[in-house]
Image (cartoon, helix red, strand yellow):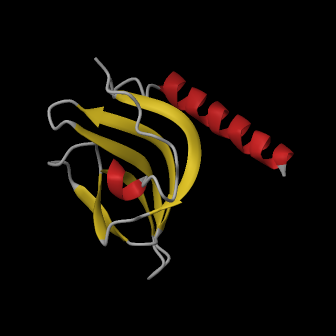
Amino acid sequence: MITRHRTQRALAAASLGLAVAAGGLATASTAQAYDTGTTTISCSAVKIRKAPSKTSTVVGIGYRHDKVVYDQWAYKKAEKTWYTRGTVSRKSDGKKIRGHMIYNCANPYKTNPAPKPSIPK
């Protein structure tokens, strides 16, 4: 079991390293990369957006208890809001949606005890 988790973390670190090398994370100056994790959506519904912003294009909607595999958090200074980036697997139709969602809906303390990252200065 421990070996599986170490392998998953190593793969996540390698994929994040490749994304940084390709410039995928370099464009999001407020983004912070962390290990991947799994949680569920705690809000009744949450909009999944293309970028971490309340005005960004909505690519889908996730519903309560849908599974989220997240790999990044981003803080939007202008909105004073944290976002979680990840892939939502909807229970209703099995569709997978990749994007950013409000942190409090996608990373609640009760389903994942990870605290919010510190606010960048």
| Horizontal relation, residue 99 to residue 12: left or right | left
**Quadrant position of the C terminus in the picture:** top left
Image location of residue 45, percent across then percent down: 30, 70
The residue at 19%/36% (across/down) is: 80
Residue 29: x percent and y percent? 32, 23
Number of numbered discs visible in the structure rendering: 0
Farthest-out residue, top: 121
Instruction: Out of 82 and 90, give the one closest to the viewer.
Output: 82
- In this rendering, the answer to whether 51 lies above or below 25 is below
- Asked whether 49 or 33 is in front, the reply is 33
- Coordinates of residue 24 in the picture (x, y in percent): 43, 31
Q: Quadrant of residue 59?
A: bottom left
Residue at the spot 81% in from the left edge and 48% down from the top edge: 4
- Could you say which is closer to the camera, residue 51 or residue 31? 31
In the rendered structure, the answer to whether residue 19 lies left or right of residue 117 reads right
The part of the image, by quadrant, that contains residue 105 is: bottom left
Residue for point 53% across, 22% down: 21
Q: Is residue 83 above or below residue 19?
A: below
The one of 115 and 1 positioned closer to us in this rendering: 115
Indicate the position of residue 53 as horizontal and vertical percent values. 21, 43
80 lies above or below 59: above
